[in-house]
Image: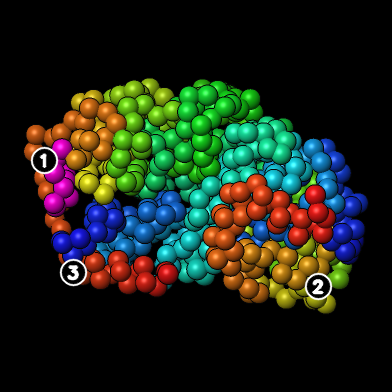
């Protein structure tokens, strides 16, 4: 059953050095506050997983929390590149970053396999591209019924998946709506999960098209109003596009970034 | 510009014109999204826009900055999960056109958005990566590509094949069993390129008004083939320009 914890306690208890951690969100409902808490607690050697690593992953990578990134598109949406990610891949700063690179279709199916309790997923993907030559987790497979050549990708089963949702009730049942990406699959695929929410309410009134994660598949719920900013939470606040644009300047420069990091952690390096 | 419009405006208008009414289009962010939204306003009110964030039939009133903006979800016929987008809608070939951008494009329409440089593990520039593009390029009925033409972007051979176009020439897609027809049109700020029916090599078939052939050749990193019946793109109409500028103003 989901426990209601503070974000600090949830991260301290459930995220360990060396873990495979997925913080999922597709433009909408990105668990930014949880990412910052991981940085503050100086977690190390994480394998970070996400389809669309954006600025909070740039920050985690720049802060030296990650040794590996499993992903399919790493950029600042609508703005450009992630400079901390680039610096880590091109210059191993602040630490080397191993990458395991997929397409969106591949990553989505890896989570589906993980959520389904299967060892791998099958798709029609990657054909003709240079990705299979660089990524060991993309393999050809032959359909046993038709003989068609398809692609297999292994299940993703993170140690911890972290998502942000609009609401939870006091029993720890979680409700999210709008663009919900691959968050349901990420939580169901994981061994443990943390859900940060805009608010904890007495009762979840039904919403059309909402995803509900019952309390018994969630490990911890933490109430963190504004926990997805500068991304957005439908029904609560809009995306702060200017913050994404402003990150380009900060992320571009190691010194500027270090200043930002010191402000976040309250530590002067 | 003396013509009363910019080369980028010409590019967006030309790209929009390629989309017919009633088509379904898997839309990449940036230039493709701008063109697709212009098309829906100008001549294709029944164009279905599909964004990989899960927005099916989005009708945004302004251009989204990112692929998952609230505006897309709020105006969509349905918002579905990301696995559903790729597995139920894209993979079975339900979508007519994939509309993509590129960092690098080669003469057979192969797209690179992964790394610049020949060593994947020690790249000159690390780019964002694949996103949805490899499967969009494989499974949509056909693919349109829009990007500005210059020798750094238009290369003889891409450093990394992120999304497969026509490989090394005609017949490669069939050999690999790729369901869609692949890139059938490239729209740039200088003109239009289409694959040669015999070789699949991208060939200049159209120049935008006021662009001379030499500058198009100079902006191409391979020896550009030119169609025997090279045409001139009709200039943007007043209506197209007004709609485009209104769209950009609403999005600023």
Q: Chain of mark 1?
A: B
Residue beneath the point at 77% across and 43% down? A65
Residue beneath the point at 13% across and 44% down? B212
The magenta-colored residue range is B206-214
Residue A45, percent from left and from top: 79, 37
Closest to the observer, B184 or A259: A259
Q: Are marks 2 and 1 on the same chain?
A: no
Helix, strand or loop for disc 3: helix
CA–CA distance in space, label 2 to label 1: 64 Å
Q: Residues within 10 Å of mark 1 (few under 14, many from 20)?
A: some
Residue B238's disc is 3
Residue A141, percent from left and from top: 58, 24
Q: Chain of mark 2?
A: A
Residue A65's disc is none
- The answer to whether residue B241 is left or right of residue A170 is left
On whether residue B45 falls in the magenta region, the answer is: no
Q: Which residue is mark 1?
A: B230
Q: Chain of mark 3?
A: B
Residue beneath the point at 43% across and 51% down? B28
Helix, strand or loop for disc 1: strand
> From the image, which quarter does the C terminus of chain B lie in?
bottom left
Coloring scheme of the render? rainbow
Vertical placement of A28 versus B135: above or below? below
- The answer to whether residue A260 is left or right of residue A80 is right
> From the image, which quarter does the N terminus of chain B lie in?
bottom left
Q: How many tags in the picture?
A: 3
- The answer to whether residue A89 is left or right of residue B105 is right
Q: Which residue is mark 2?
A: A200
Helix, strand or loop for disc 2: strand
């Amino acid at each position: 059953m989901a426990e209601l914890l503070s974000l600090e306690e949830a991260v301290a208890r459930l995220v360990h050095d060396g873990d495979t951690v997925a913080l999922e969100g597709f433009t909408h409902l990105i668990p930014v506050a949880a990412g910052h808490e991981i940085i503050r607690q100086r977690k190390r050697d994480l394998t970070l997983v996400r389809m669309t690593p954006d600025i909070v992953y740039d920050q985690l990578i720049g802060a030296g929390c990650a040794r590996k990134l499993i992903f399919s598109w790493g950029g600042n949406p609508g703005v450009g590149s992630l400079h901390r990610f680039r610096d880590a891949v091109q210059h191993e700063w602040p630490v080397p970053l191993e990458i395991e690179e997929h397409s969106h279709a591949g990553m989505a199916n890896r989570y589906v396999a993980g959520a389904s309790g299967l060892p791998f997923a099958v798709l029609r993907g990657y054909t003709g591209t240079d990705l299979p030559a660089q990524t060991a987790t993309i393999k050809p497979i032959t359909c046993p019924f038709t003989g068609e050549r398809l692609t297999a990708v292994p299940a993703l089963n993170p140690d911890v998946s972290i998502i942000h949702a609009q609401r939870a009730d006091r029993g720890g049942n979680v409700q999210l709506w709008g663009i919900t990406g691959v968050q349901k699959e990420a939580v169901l695929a994981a061994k443990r999960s943390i859900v940060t929410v805009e608010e904890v309410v007495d009762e979840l009134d039904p919403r059309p098209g909402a995803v509900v994660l019952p309390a018994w598949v969630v490990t911890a719920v933490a109430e963190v109003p504004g926990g997805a900013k500068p991304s957005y939470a439908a029904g609560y606040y809009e995306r702060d596009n200017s913050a994404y644009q402003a990150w380009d300047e900060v992320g571009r420069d190691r010194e500027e970034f270090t200043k930002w990091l010191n402000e976040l952690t309250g530590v002067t390096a | 510009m003396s013509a009363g419009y910019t080369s980028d405006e010409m590019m967006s208008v030309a790209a929009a014109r390629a989309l017919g009414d009633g088509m379904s289009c898997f839309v990449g962010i940036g230039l493709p999204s701008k063109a697709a939204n212009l098309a829906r306003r100008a001549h294709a009110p029944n164009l279905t826009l599909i964004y990989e964030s899960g927005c099916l039939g989005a009708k945004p009133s302004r251009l989204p900055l990112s692929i998952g903006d609230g505006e897309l979800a709020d105006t969509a016929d349905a918002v579905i999960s990301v696995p559903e987008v790729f597995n139920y809608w894209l993979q079975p070939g339900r979508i007519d056109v994939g509309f993509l951008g590129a960092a690098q494009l080669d003469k057979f329409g192969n797209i690179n958005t992964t790394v610049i440089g020949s060593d994947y593990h020690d790249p000159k520039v690390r780019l964002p990566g694949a996103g949805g593009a490899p499967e969009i390029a494989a499974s949509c009925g056909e693919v349109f590509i829009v990007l500005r033409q210059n020798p750094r972007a238009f290369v003889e051979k891409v450093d990394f094949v992120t999304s497969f176009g026509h490989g090394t020439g005609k017949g490669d897609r069939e050999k690999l069993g790729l369901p869609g027809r692949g890139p059938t049109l490239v729209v740039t700020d200088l003109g239009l390129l289409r694959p040669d029916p015999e070789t699949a090599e991208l060939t200049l078939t159209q120049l935008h008004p006021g662009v001379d052939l030499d500058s198009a050749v100079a902006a191409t990193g391979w020896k550009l083939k030119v169609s025997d019946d090279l045409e001139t793109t009709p200039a943007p109409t007043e209506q197209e320009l007004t709609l485009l500028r209104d769209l950009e103003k609403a999005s600023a």
